[in-house]
Image: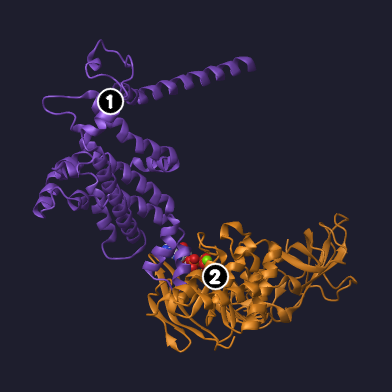
Amino acid sequence: MPDARTAARATGGISRTLLLAFACLVMAAPFLWMAATSLMGQLEVFSSGRLFPESPLWSNYPEALTAQPFGRYFLNSLIFATVVVAGQVATATAAGYAFARCDFPGRDTLFMVFLATMMVPAVIVLIPRFLMIDALGWIDSYQGLVSTELVSVWGIFLMRQYFRTLPRELEDAARVDGAGHWRIFRSVALPLAKPAVATLALFAFIDAWKNFMWPLLVTRSMEMRVVEVGIAAFHSTYEINWPYQMVAGVVAALPIALLFLFTQRYFVRGIQLEGIR
Amino acid sequence: MTREPRAVVLKGVRKRFGDVTAVADVDLEIRPGELMVLVGPSGCGKSTLLRLIAGLEEHDAGEVWIGDRCVDEVAPGSRDVAMVFQSYALYPHMTVAENLGFGLRVRGAGPAEIGRRVSEVAEVLGLGGLLSRRPGQLSGGQQQRVALGRAMVRDPGVFLFDEPLSNLDAALRLQTRDEIAALHRRLGTTMIFVTHDQVEALSLGQRVAVMDRGRVQQLGTPHEIYRRPANLFVAAFVGSPPMNRLRLARDGEGRLAGGPFVFPGSSPHPEATLGVRPEDLTVAVVAPPASGPPPGSAGTRPGPHPSPEFTATALRVESLGSEQRIHLDGPDDAAWVARAPSALRIAAGDRVDVSVAWQRTHLFGPDGSRTGAAPQPGRGSHPGTPA
Ligand SMILES: Nc1ncnc2c1ncn2[C@@H]1O[C@H](COP(=O)(O)OP(=O)(O)O)[C@@H](O)[C@H]1O
Ligand SMILES: [Mg+2]
């Protein structure tokens, strides 16, 4: 009975579409709510559980963004994320290549030790990191902000796995051509690892951009604050300005949303590897 | 090119991977300017041997000499060798020109010299129009030429080829084989060429080293390898269709016997193997099948061939145009193949008289090594084919 089957398939298609639409709504709801709240008056937020502003209060935006030096915060976030990306790419590619292709005693054991550190929750090392930075006198400075973020074990793992998939004969050919490890790394392996580097850079950027705890801990002055910390500052002990905070949230999320639009395929690759993170 | 060709000498070279002995105590001398082919079945250690010469693997014992120096401690890039890989191993992110020039660039040659050498080689190999393409935009044959060019650009003392033709289609393979032979004649450089294809080996090599299980089984000219195989392995590996074989055992009077044959003289070995190449058998059709009992013993009938050694049935006839291959139920029911001219009128099921060119046969002792040609067997004591 082809008709019944077609009908069944159509029903299946419809129910799947509905399910996906519902899932999307659930995922998007907090963001929509954030956007809606950013356009409400401070009291309207609490009135009668309404979801959308009666009339959008666009003035929230200039007001919130000038209530604190957000320009400076954005600059700091950008510096922080950029340096972290550069650092992680440099360390992860070099270490990943060494773990994948250089023979040295204890290589695999060392790699296991690296992997084992991924099982330690990040919060646990927050205090030791803080104490180290403090001992160096780097609290409230850029070097204090970035220096402990420059190495990512996940990044090393990602790059090692990728380098291992490159055909060995390519490197053999380069060796016969007279290239040493460093030359092979720079001229052959690294150019071929661009997709993995892009994935690593993307995830490192996002992680750094949304990092809250570490910048909060290690910075003091307004000049050193990053966006995430600035958002939280609307949430002070005695007063919470929800609309302003949501304004900052919307603006902080924009770069990530844009990034996602242009780099979706690297996201997919990264998420495939996410299970190991 | 004016450079001096280099000899390559392996002295007791051994290489193990875990429990696998890939190369077992190989002694081999490749003369300056020689085109030597290493041939053997897959997994016999050919690639490993080549990679040991290139320095891509480190041997566990022995020495490798290139020219007048021991290169055991010399990096691959400083051994004055160039290698063409089976997969070509072109750098996918570089253009053809960059691929060709990479080795020169690594060695610190200037852009002018690199450009000159690259265009020289591109001209020789007909790659001129492809210089700005990437390997992914080339056909298999073009990639193969780029790989060849990358080796030539550096003007090395020794060329190493690891099955460079095996990814090409049949026509291109033949053409490229001839080109490599021509290249060798023109450059006069030492070349070591690895293949699993015995036809390729015999047609290309000035000398051929046949390998099996990590050892060189025989080293010789293609003629020697084919005509005087050192042992059963070489005999079976070289030649297509392979050599026909028959197991022989010593009879009560100390003579070797098997099938219809009894060989004169007493044998020192309790058993042996007779080998006959398909072209050293001559067949003549006796009569159509199923027309009564099979004909009597040879010699009672007039036939085109005066002295048939046994009769057999043609089980299958392959017609290859220039010749025919006739599959026979040979002596002791061994599956034998004979080559016959295409003019011979023969069909499956025909009874045939088969004669043997004894002076071109081979006897192998119990350990498989060749002891010589089989003598003309005596007749009469074992008439006809056994049932
Ligand atoms: N890197 C390696 N690690 C482990 N075993 C290897 C390695 N390379 C080669 N072998 C083994 O050594 C033997 C010879 O291999 P190879 O030289 O590639 O043979 P061929 O080129 O004649 O086919 C094979 O048994 C192969 O499995
Ligand atoms: Mg091989």
User: Mark 2 belongs to which amino acid?
Assistant: Leu
Q: Nearer the viewer, mark 1 or mark 2?
A: 1
Q: Position of residue A169 (x, y in %)?
A: 48, 64
Q: Split into 4 quadrants, where in the image is the N terminus of chain B?
A: bottom right
Badge 2: chain ID? B
Query: Which colour denotes chain B?
Result: orange
Q: Position of residue A105 (x, y in %)?
A: 27, 65
Label 1 Cα crowd, 10 Å radius (few <14 / some 14-19 / many 20+): many
Q: Would you name the residue on which mark 2 appears? A: B100
Q: Split into 4 quadrants, where in the image is the C terminus of chain B?
A: bottom right
User: Mark 1 belongs to which amino acid?
Assistant: Asn
Position of B256 relative to A5 (above/below) = below
Query: Which is nearer the eye, B195 or A169?
Result: A169
SS for tag 1? helix
User: Which quadrant holds residue B194?
Assistant: bottom right
Residue B20: tell me if it is visible: yes
Query: Which is nearer the eye, B312 or A83?
Result: A83
Position of B25 relative to B140 (above/below) = below
Residue B163: tell me if it is visible: no
Q: Would you name the residue on which mark 1 appears? A: A60
* Residue found at x 82% / y 64%: B321
The numbered mark at residue A270 is none
Label 2 Cα crowd, 10 Å radius (few <14 / some 14-19 / many 20+): many
User: Which quadrant holds residue B353?
Assistant: bottom right
Query: Which is nearer the eye, B14 or B368?
Result: B14
Q: How is the image coloured?
A: by chain
